[in-house]
Amino acid sequence: YGFSKLIAGVLTDRFSARVFMAVGIALTGVINILFGFQKALWAFCILWFLNGIFQGFGAPPCAKLLTNWYSKTERGTWWGFWNTSHNTGGFLIPLLSGYCVRAFGWQYGMIVPGFIGIAMGAFLYDRIRDSPESVGLPPVDVYRGEELATTDEGKPPDEKKLSVRETLFKYVLSEPNVWLLAVSYFFVYFVRQGISSWSHIYLLDAKGVANAQEAAFRVSGMEVGGLLGSLCSGWTSDRVLRGRRIPVIIFWLIGVIVCVAALRAVPVSWRYANWLAVFGIGFFIYGPQMLVGLQGAEIVHKSAVSSTIGLLGWIAYLGASIAGYPLTTIVTQYGWNAYFISLFGFAGTAILLLLPMWRVGMKARPDVARG
């Protein structure tokens, strides 16, 4: 999935975001339908692999479309709204699939969502357009009276069509801030995976919560907090900081550290305080998860937005995928204190990596600009 995001990002910058997004979700639907007709383990493995590939076609086109259709001072809000799809989809699909499994059999838990995916792909292909210019409208920056994107020298970007290799090296791989964002994203996802995978176990093993159901209740606030955190962080970066993302990311990561410390410190008898601590972790971790990608899209040329999102997404999921073994080793060999210290360290490292970018998006004062 992560590698697919990288490849899809590069290809989306060369071709149509509308086509990639519609085809990706439709093919994901086809794969889900095929799941319902299989019995062999090898077939499940192949289809699961293909499912990851086609699902990777979603995020880079979405990022490209949001960048093209929304200006800098409103993009954070809508990007945050888009990011809530993780939470709303994760909440609704188990209800739909669960009903289908109970009513018609396990196969229909895969088949029905698959047909919904195909229908949604057709709907997106019919309704979405790649940019305002593709339907005869002015660029969104011009329409809203905001500055057009410029290169580091302050000149309008070169609109000459570049090859894939030229685009990657000129606008993505040679941009130091992209790499700062990428490595910080690695640690953000490491922390997120560490909390989502281990908080339930921590409550049972270290805090002595009575049973798995009670522990599940206490960690259930993470997704709710994540939904609200995404919306609030995007709105704050738009309305309070006028399009600056890095300060919000840093403050939200500090919030993660505070809430992780609260989870460690709150007594087991304080049931709802435990829930609030996990809610706070979700609130503050999903904001950076969303805004790092948005900041990456805004510091590169528009022709490289999807490639940048693909690179960031690949590195982020690399962090999530490898988080299991190190944290397992830390918990089993050094205990829960070492686990929490490692989470503080990962979040703190992400903050340090982002500090050099503090002024990104800050407009120079007129007198400074004239000087």
Image: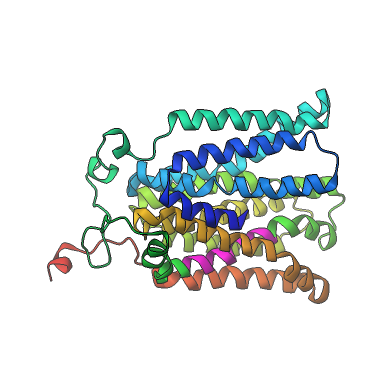
Q: Tell which of 158 and 360 is nearer to you.
A: 158
Q: Tell which of 267 and 203 is nearer to you.
A: 203
Q: Residue at x 36, y 54 (%)?
A: 303
Task: Examine the rendering and report whether any part of residue 233 can be seen.
Answer: yes
Residue reaching furthest to the bottom: 334
Horizontal side, residue 318 vs residue 297: left or right: right
Q: Quadrant of residue 54?
A: top right
Horizontal side, residue 67 vs residue 227: left or right: left
Q: Residue at x 62, y 70 (%)?
A: 344
Magenta stretch containing residue 283, yes or no? no
Q: Tell which of 232 and 124 is nearer to you.
A: 124
Q: Tell which of 341 and 1 is nearer to you.
A: 1
Quadrant in the picture for the C terminus:
bottom left
Task: Examine the rendering and report whether any part of residue 289 can be seen.
Answer: no
**Dominant secondary structure (helix, strand or loop) of the stretch shown in magenta:** helix
Give residue 185's position: percent from left, percent from top: 54, 63
Q: Residue at x 79, y 33 (%)?
A: 37
| Above or below: residue 189 compared with residue 346 | above
Horizontal side, residue 116 vs residue 306: left or right: right
Give residue 370's position: percent from left, percent from top: 12, 67
The colour style of the image is: rainbow
| Above or below: residue 126 compared with residue 146 | above
Q: Which residues are magenta?
A: 180-194
Magenta stretch containing residue 188, yes or no? yes
Horizontal side, residue 226 vs residue 129: left or right: right
Give residue 305's position: percent from left, percent from top: 41, 54
Q: Quadrant of residue 166?
A: bottom left
Residue reaching furthest to the front: 163
| Above or below: residue 113 compared with residue 252 | above
Count of numbered labels shown in the rendering: 0
Give residue 315's position: percent from left, percent from top: 57, 63
